[in-house]
């Protein structure tokens, strides 16, 4: 439900909206129509009960846009984006009883810019630049843990224990594997540093894979990309194919011994977006035992009620066992889920639309815990 006050984080966010002017949809305007119908009180209470008393996991987030802290970017548009409000976002996460969120590095942020209504890579990395920027962002994440702002989760058991004690924990990931370059040993180093998931590619087509929003270079995965998939399986790292092309997804599924996820996307529908999945693409992921994290993006939703419909479309198409939530918090396109407090309202909306409490528990956390456990059990490194 809409709050009547503005926290320091919201003041920062609203300032960013004015400064950036909605560049590439990173506008931070909050809809006043998230709850377009009056939900019965018993459903509101039931939704809150699901969020409070079962593991709740966000598959993808950028809390406080930590990835911009100390960033060296030539883009004045990127520089205008607010950052450094991790403490407020983590407080929001804890207050809303969200058990875990995947805090994600943005591997190619140094070379990205806003152009023609989208995000693109404007140049290649200089030698050593990608790895150095990865280390900068990793230090930001480690600082959150070292200062006690939030504890890290390294295993499914850590998430279960956090939920039992009503604590919140962070999982670490990287959006893009640019930092790996051609050094497979960096995957093991990333695991040792606490990362548990890496997406192969982001907005920059790297040496591993093609993405959804750029012309194909590799026709799917490169030879190096295939080697990275095998090594990620060995290390017990979750392969995230968000942003990867359908051909790259197909190549990955031919190789991987573990289920994969697409941390934040939706089904194609009334809106045609390169970032969405067609039915064949979505079914490939489900057949592998994987997950699609429903993405509360303004690309195809005007409010939270619309987003509940997108969640249900995924459930109806690929099955309840293969759907989760990936908010892309603080990095989203016109977000319709702006605070973690919205999770309880979303749960109530899904109950209203006919899902059971058990269905909701799968979507909000149990499905991811299953996938995480499977990937960890197959680790051989």
Image (tube, rainbow, N blue to C red):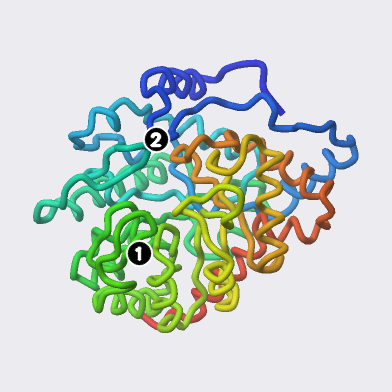
**238 is higher (above) or lower (below) than 258:** above
The residue under the point 35% across, 60% down is 211
- The residue beneath circle 2 is 24
> As rendered, which of 67 and 284 lies closer to the eye?
284
Position of residue 142 measured from the top left corner of the image (x, y, whole percent) = 35, 47
**45 is higher (above) or lower (below) than 239:** above
> As rendered, which of 179 and 161 lies closer to the eye?
179
- The residue beneath circle 1 is 200
Position of residue 228 measured from the top left corner of the image (x, y, whole percent) = 30, 74
The residue under the point 46% across, 24% down is 13
Is disc 2 surrounded by few (<14), some (14 to 19) or many (20+) residues within 10 Å?
Answer: some
Say whether residue 69 is left or right of residue 377. Answer: left
> As rendered, which of 116 and 78 lies closer to the eye?
116
Say whether residue 110 is left or right of residue 138. Answer: left
User: Label 2 vs label 1: CA separation?
Assistant: 23 Å
> As rendered, which of 351 and 191 lies closer to the eye?
351
What is the quadrant of the N terminus in the image? top right
The residue under the point 57% across, 54% down is 266
Say whether residue 283 is left or right of residue 164. Answer: left
**Quick one: label 2 or label 1, which is nearer the N terminus?**
2
Is disc 1 surrounded by few (<14), some (14 to 19) or many (20+) residues within 10 Å?
Answer: many
For mark 2, give the secondary structure. Answer: helix
What is the quadrant of the C terminus in the image? bottom left
For mark 1, give the secondary structure. Answer: loop
Position of residue 313 measured from the top left corner of the image (x, y, whole percent) = 69, 57
Please state which of the two labelled residues, at mark 2 or mark 1, is closer to the viewer. Answer: 2
**20 is higher (above) or lower (below) than 90:** above
Position of residue 317 measured from the top left corner of the image (x, y, whole percent) = 68, 65
Contact between marks 2 and 1 (CB within 8 A): the answer is: no
């Amino acid at each position: 439900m809409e709050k009547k006050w503005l926290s320091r984080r919201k003041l920062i966010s609203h300032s960013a909206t004015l400064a950036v002017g909605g560049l590439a949809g990173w506008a931070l305007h909050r809809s006043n129509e998230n709850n377009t119908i009056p939900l019965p009180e018993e459903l509101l209470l039931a939704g809150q009960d699901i969020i409070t008393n079962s593991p709740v996991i966000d598959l993808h987030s950028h809390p406080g846009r930590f990835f911009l802290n100390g960033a060296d970017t030539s883009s004045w548009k990127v520089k205008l984006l607010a950052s450094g409000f991790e403490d407020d976002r983590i407080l929001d996460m804890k207050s809303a009883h969200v058990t875990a969120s995947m805090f994600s590095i943005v591997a190619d942020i140094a070379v990205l810019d806003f152009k023609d209504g989208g995000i693109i890579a404007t140049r290649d990395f200089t030698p050593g630049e990608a790895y150095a920027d990865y280390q900068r962002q990793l230090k930001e994440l480690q600082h959150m843990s070292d200062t006690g702002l939030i504890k890290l989760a390294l295993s499914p058991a850590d998430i279960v224990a956090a939920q039992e004690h009503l604590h919140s924990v962070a999982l670490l990931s990287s959006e893009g594997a640019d930092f790996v370059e051609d050094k497979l040993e960096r995957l093991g180093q990333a695991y040792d540093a606490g990362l548990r998931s890496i997406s192969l590619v982001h907005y920059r087509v790297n040496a591993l894979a093609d993405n959804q929003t750029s012309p194909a270079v590799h026709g799917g995965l490169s030879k190096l990309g295939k080697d990275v998939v095998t090594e990620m399986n060995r290390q017990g790292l979750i392969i995230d194919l968000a942003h990867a092309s359908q051909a790259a997804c197909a190549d990955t599924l031919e190789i991987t011994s573990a289920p994969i996820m697409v941390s934040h996307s939706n089904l194609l529908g009334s809106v045609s977006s390169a970032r969405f999945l067609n039915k064949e693409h979505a079914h490939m992921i489900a057949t592998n035992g994987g997950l699609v994290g429903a993405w509360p993006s303004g690309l195809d939703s005007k409010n939270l009620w619309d987003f509940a419909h997108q969640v249900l479309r995924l459930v109806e198409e690929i099955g309840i066992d293969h759907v989760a939530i990936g908010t892309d918090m603080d990095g989203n396109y016109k977000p319709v889920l702006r605070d973690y407090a919205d999770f309880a309202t979303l749960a109530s909306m899904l109950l209203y639309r006919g899902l059971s409490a058990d269905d909701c528990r799968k979507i909000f956390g149990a499905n991811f815990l299953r996938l995480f456990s499977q990937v960890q059990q197959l680790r051989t490194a």
